[in-house]
Image (spheres, grey):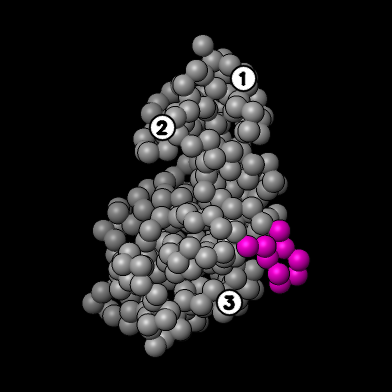
Amino acid sequence: MLTQTLPMDIPSRPLDASRFNTLAHLSSGSYGEVFTAADLENNNKEVVIKKIPKTNSNRRVKNEIEAHEKIPQSKKGLVKFHGSFESRNHLYLVFDRVRGGDLFALMEHNGFRPLPEFMVLRILRSVVNTLVHCHNHGVAHRDIKLENILVDPHVTSAVLIDFGLCSFFTSSGANESLTEDLCGSLEYIAPEVIFQKPLQASKTDSWALGITMYCLLFGQFPYAVTDALQRGEDPYGQETAPSVPLPKNSMEDGIQVSEELRGLLSGLLRFDPQSRTTVQAASQHPLLKKNKKKEFCHTENSMMI
């Protein structure tokens, strides 16, 4: 039996469960399952439904709904949230269907070889603009990673998904309220999260975005930093450099990254959060303000998803 009400502590935008006809299973994870469905009240428009066991923490569900309520849904880089319903054992969240796949699938399809700079810039420009929009409305994503960024089949635009770990903050000028929420995926979490101190959530988004871009540009994670964090060591207390070292350009390894982009990436990956580049500042970088005309042409070797 499906009903429309949600637990009292979860903000509600109730939907009638009978309007959706499940089509196919897309994926499963610790958070729940994802299905496609047809919206019978909207010309059978295809949507995505997250099915989440009630035994899981309600906080992720509450965060997801509240984030989409706080952030205006007109932004191109966000997936539209339609509402929710529940059964005895599960909660269901309904979103628009986004065609394409995530960046992890793109990198896997490409054998984890570095992507060309112009393509990374296209993705970075889109995600930065979306994050600026989120931060302007007091929402930090807190789980930016390859798997949470969707791109269309021709990699012309990017969409940020899964706000289940997000943090909410207030700001006045350059002052941002602190959070004690310690979350994120290990390979992407900022150094300050490891040491369990109050932090500025938006600065952790900068770091995670930098790690994501590092993966796209160099085809690997900065393992020395990740290992230090896993051991609970302080990377910026031990490193002589102020930011994560970047691999050198190499024709053999397919790495060709301009000095301009290296400078931007180093700013995002500064160990000290106080000197780390914000996404707002990144959005004003000349590389991201350029409207490059070069398009990625589809060939049999292109990175279609």
Give the residue type at disc 1.
Gln
Give the residue type at disc 2.
Glu
Image location (x, y in percent) of residue 168 = 64, 53
Image location (x, y in percent) of residue 218 = 34, 70
Which residue in the structure is indicated by mark 2?
Answer: 33
Instruction: Tell me the SS state at disc 2.
Output: strand
Nearer to us in this view, 183 or 140: 183
Instruction: Tell me the SS state at disc 1.
Output: loop
Residue drawn 43% across and 79% down? Answer: 236
> In the rendered view, does 121 fall on the left or right side of 16?
left
Residue drawn 56% across and 27% down? Answer: 45
Residue drawn 35% across and 50% down? Answer: 105
Which residue in the structure is indicated by mark 1?
Answer: 4
Q: Nearer the viewer, mark 1 or mark 3?
A: 3
> In the rendered view, does 231 fall on the left or right side of 298?
left
Image location (x, y in percent) of residue 305 = 37, 48
133 in the magenta segment: no
Spatial CA distance of label 1 from label 2 is 19 Å
Q: Which mark is residue 274?
A: 3
Image location (x, y in percent) of residue 257 = 40, 78
> In the rendered view, does 33 fall on the left or right side of 83?
left
Residue range of the region highlighted in magenta in the rendering: 170-178
Spatial CA distance of label 1 from label 3 is 45 Å
Nearer to us in this view, 194 or 226: 194
> In the rendered view, does 264 fall on the left or right side of 305?
right
Q: Earlier in the sequence, mark 1 or mark 2?
A: 1
Q: Residues within 10 Å of mark 3 (few under 14, many from 20)?
A: few
Spatial CA distance of label 2 from label 3 is 38 Å
Q: Residues within 10 Å of mark 1 (few under 14, many from 20)?
A: some
Give the residue type at disc 3.
Gln
Q: Which mark is residue 121?
A: none
Q: Earlier in the sequence, mark 2 or mark 3?
A: 2
